[in-house]
Image: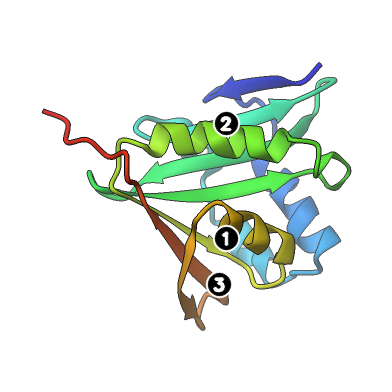
Amino acid sequence: MIEYKINSCKYDIKNFIKNIAVNEFNINYWNEWLENQEYDKLQEKPNILISAEQDNKLIGICSIKELSKDECILNSFYVEKTRRNKGIGSKIFNMCEDYANKYKKIILCVDPNFKDAITFYEKRGYIFDYYDDNRKELYYYKNINSYKEVK
C-alpha cells in the first residue's frame, strides 16, 4: 500500500533525487548543487512537501516553496523510475497544486533532459517562459484561475 504524507518525510531526499538525476539521467553537474540544498526546510511552513512511500521506502516526492504572497515554486518533483506512469506522480503533483491554489502563480523549473516531465507539465497547462543558461533549466509557469484574495 502506498502512503502519501504531508511534511513528514523521514527519508534522505537529497540521495533520492541524486539517484534519479545523476544515475538515471547522467546529470553529474547537479552533484554540487544537490549538496548545497537544505531539503529539510521544504517541510517547514509555509512550504509543503508531499511524499509517496511504500514498504519503508521513498518512491516519490513533490514540494511547493513560497516565493511571495502571490507566487510559489513547485520543485523537487521526482518519482522512482519503476513507479512512473502508475498515477503516483499525478497524485503527489495534484496534492501540491491543490495547496498552491492560494497563490496567483506557480513557477517551476526543469532540466531539459527530463522530457517526460516537460510533457507532464505542459499537459497540465504550464507555459514555457524562458531558458536559464546559467542554471541550465527551463522555466515554466501557470496562472491560478481559482485564486481568491484572502482577507
Disc 3/disc 1 C-alpha distance (Å): 15 Å
Residue 35 in view of the camera: no
Instruction: Residue lying at the far right in this picture: please name it.
Output: 82
**At numbered mark 2, what does the secondary structure look like: helix, strand or loop?**
strand
**At numbered mark 3, what does the secondary structure look like: helix, strand or loop?**
strand
Q: Is residue 6 above or below residue 120?
A: above
At horizontal 72% and vertical 34% (from top left) the residue drawn is: 88
Q: Quadrant of residue 137?
A: bottom right
Q: Is residue 50 left or right of residue 106?
A: right
**CB within 8 Å, label 2 to label 3:** no
Q: Which label belongs to residue 50? A: 2
Query: How many other residues sit within 10 Å of disc 1, few (<14), some (14-19) or many (≥20)?
Result: some
Residue 22 in view of the camera: yes
At horizontal 36% and vertical 37% (from top left) the residue drawn is: 101
Query: How many other residues sit within 10 Å of disc 2, few (<14), some (14-19) or many (≥20)?
Result: many
**CB within 8 Å, label 1 to label 2:** no
**Residue at image mark 1:** 122
At horizontal 17% and vertical 31% (from top left) the residue drawn is: 150
Q: Is residue 11 left or right of residue 20?
A: left
Q: Position of residue 57 (x, y in %)?
A: 80, 28
At horizontal 57% and vertical 31% (from top left) the residue drawn is: 50
Q: Is residue 102 above or below residue 70?
A: above
Q: Amino acid at mark 1?
A: Glu
